[in-house]
Image: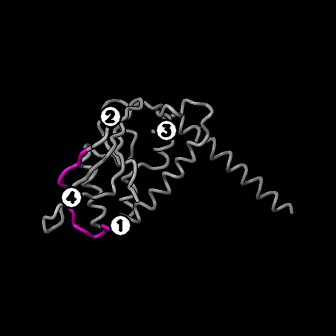
């Protein structure tokens, strides 16, 4: 019985340590960055570059790279969410749950994209945004992402896996890979 209590104490201490470390890390995410710098990992210099990187990951059937090219749970919770107007409402408690759902939907989206388009050599033809952008503090969310690609025979079609794209100081990253 004492060993079980000792394990619980250690688990509680580790949990407190993790929460404290996370709080310190998040304190460094002020929501500000200098021009040209980004807080987004694996961000691209343009929407076209972001899409080309996704196409390369699909062609290589590289799930890890494909997953890294979309907004991570940490980026969602620590960079995007604090900029949203809803985050200013102290009664809003489900933003972290939204991050969890976002993550789960992305996992399904990556699997589906690889199942449907993995191994295909697709070439980018055009990227456009068909809906108005939303500005949240220093971030811009480009909505209605439409990506036109061509296959090796030259046949063009829209690749329906791209969600919105997040811009941070001129750097771009997919918010999601849609299922």
Q: Nearer the viewer, mark 1 or mark 2?
A: 1
Label 1 or label 2, whichever comes before in sequence order? 1
Label 3 or label 4, whichever comes before in sequence order? 3
| Residue that label 1 marks | 114
Q: Tag on residue 169? A: 2
Q: Judge whether residue 72 is colored magenta.
A: no
Give the CA separation, mark 3 to mark 2: 17 Å
Q: Residue at x 51, y 42 (%)?
A: 77
Give the CA separation, mark 3 to mark 4: 31 Å
Q: Nearer the viewer, residue 84 or 12?
A: 84
Q: Judge whether residue 126 is colored magenta.
A: yes
Marks 3 and 2 in Cβ contact (< 8 Å) = no
As helix, strand or loop, the secondary structure at mark 1 comes to: helix
User: Dot 2: within a 10 Å radius of its alpha carbon, few (fewer than 14), some, or many (20 or more) residues?
Assistant: some
Give the CA separation, mark 1 to mark 2: 30 Å
Q: Residue 20 is drawn in which quadrant?
A: top right
Q: Tag on residue 81? A: 3
Q: Residue 24 is drawn in which quadrant?
A: top right
Marks 3 and 4 in Cβ contact (< 8 Å) = no
| Residue that label 4 marks | 149
> Residue 111: horizontal and vertical position, in percent?
41, 65
Query: Please, is residue 113 above or below residue 19 in the view?
Result: below
Label 4 or label 1, whichever comes before in sequence order? 1
Q: Nearer the viewer, residue 25 or 149?
A: 149
Q: Residue at x 13, y 68 (%)?
A: 153
> Residue 120: horizontal and vertical position, in percent?
25, 68
Q: Residue at x 15, y 64 (%)?
A: 155
How are the residues colored? Answer: one colour
Q: Nearer the viewer, mark 3 or mark 2?
A: 3
As helix, strand or loop, the secondary structure at mark 3 comes to: helix
Give the CA separation, mark 3 to mark 1: 28 Å
Q: Tag on residue 69? A: none
């Amino acid at each position: 019985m004492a060993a079980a209590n000792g394990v619980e104490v250690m688990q509680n201490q580790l949990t407190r340590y993790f929460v404290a470390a996370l709080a310190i890390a998040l304190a460094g995410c002020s929501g500000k960055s200098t021009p040209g710098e980004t807080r987004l990992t694996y961000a691209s210099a343009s929407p076209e570059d972001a899409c080309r990187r996704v196409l390369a990951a699909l062609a290589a059937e590289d799930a890890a790279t494909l997953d890294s090219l979309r907004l991570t749970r940490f980026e969602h919770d620590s960079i995007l969410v604090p900029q949203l107007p809803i985050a200013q409402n102290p009664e809003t408690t489900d933003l972290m749950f939204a991050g969890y759902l976002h993550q789960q939907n992305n996992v399904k989206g990556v699997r589906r994209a690889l199942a449907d388009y993995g191994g295909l050599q697709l070439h980018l033809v055009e990227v456009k945004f068909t809906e108005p952008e939303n500005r949240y503090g220093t971030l811009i969310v480009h909505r209605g992402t439409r990506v036109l690609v061509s296959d090796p025979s030259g046949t063009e079609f829209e690749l329906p896996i791209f969600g919105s794209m997040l811009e941070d100081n001129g750097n771009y990253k997919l918010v999601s890979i849609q299922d």
